[in-house]
Image (cartoon, coloured by chain):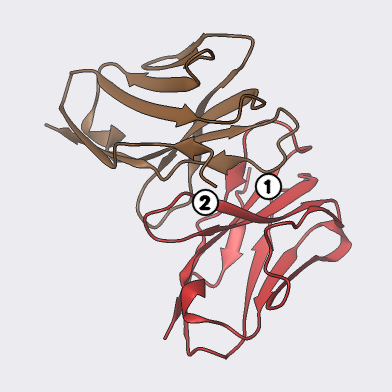
Chain colours: A brown, B red
Amino acid sequence: DQQVKQNSPSLSVQEGRISILNCDYTNSMFDYFLWYKKYPAEGPTFLISISSIKDKNEDGRFTVFLNKSAKHLSLHIVPSQPGDSAVYFCAASYYNNNDMRFGAGTRLTVKP
Amino acid sequence: EAGVAQSPRYKIIEKRQSVAFWCNPISGHATLYWYQQILGQGPKLLIQFQNNGVVDDSQLPKDRFSAERLKGVDSTLKIQPAKLEDSAVYLCASSLSGVGPLHFGNGTRLTVT
């Protein structure tokens, strides 16, 4: 069962523009959401998270938005930089971290 | 802070052979996870340890996969016998206490021919 879905396998944006990556989930019991970034031949690296009591969390150029009623979250990167080119995974879990579920990933390419 | 260490980085075996992967988590991290990532999919949890006890192994194919965590630190994941569909990247991750983000190693890419 795929409880976390990233429907866009890839996204290409121009340097300096906004990148918006989307994620949907089906389990309303999830209360902790994360984004990970993965470069080739490396493991995923934690980027930003949000708990279900918030609808927005910001860290520098990265902002995550959570819409609980729509079971949807998004990651905004502003401004996008070529070094942001990577695969981005959305993940969801209960706050105690058991069985974190991952989406299939979105490959972001930022063109100079 | 040293990251999560995994070895080997790559492994190629024939089907029905056995293979083992090793993981050393970040020092002091009580919780250790093994994930399987098949090409084009997100990581899928195989097993979670809290210290040297198993918290969740509901998605571990126990007829062929086994894992242990010695003295609550290092861990090994074994596959015996391997099948073609086991070809994947095996990721080890750790967290301080089972709460918050996971710290992943660089993974072991397994190819079963």
The chain containing the residue under callout 1 comes to B
Which quadrant does the C terminus of chain B fall into? bottom left
User: Horizontally, is B16 left or right of B66 in the view?
Assistant: left
From the top left corner, tell me how far across and down residue B57 is, in percent: 75, 57
From the top left corner, tell me how far across and down residue A51 is, in percent: 62, 18
Residues at discs 1 and 2 in contact (Cβ within 8 Å): no
The first of marks 1 and 2 along the sequence is 2
Mark 2 neighbour density, 10 Å: few (under 14) some (14–19) many (20 or more): many
Foreground mark, 1 or 2, reads 2
Residue at 36% from the left image edge and 47% from the top image edge: A39
Work out whether A76 lies above or below A105.
Answer: above
Q: How far apart are marks 1 and 2 (CA)?
A: 14 Å
Q: What element carries label 1?
A: strand
Residue B94's label in the rendered image is 1
Residue B43's label in the rendered image is 2
From the top left corner, tell me how far across and down residue A64 is, in percent: 45, 17
From the top left corner, tell me how far across and down residue A88 is, in percent: 38, 38
User: Horizontally, is B100 left or right of A107 in the view?
Assistant: right
Badge 1 amino acid = Ser
Q: Is mark 2 on a helix, strand or loop?
A: loop
Residue at 24% from the left image edge and 23% from the top image edge: A80
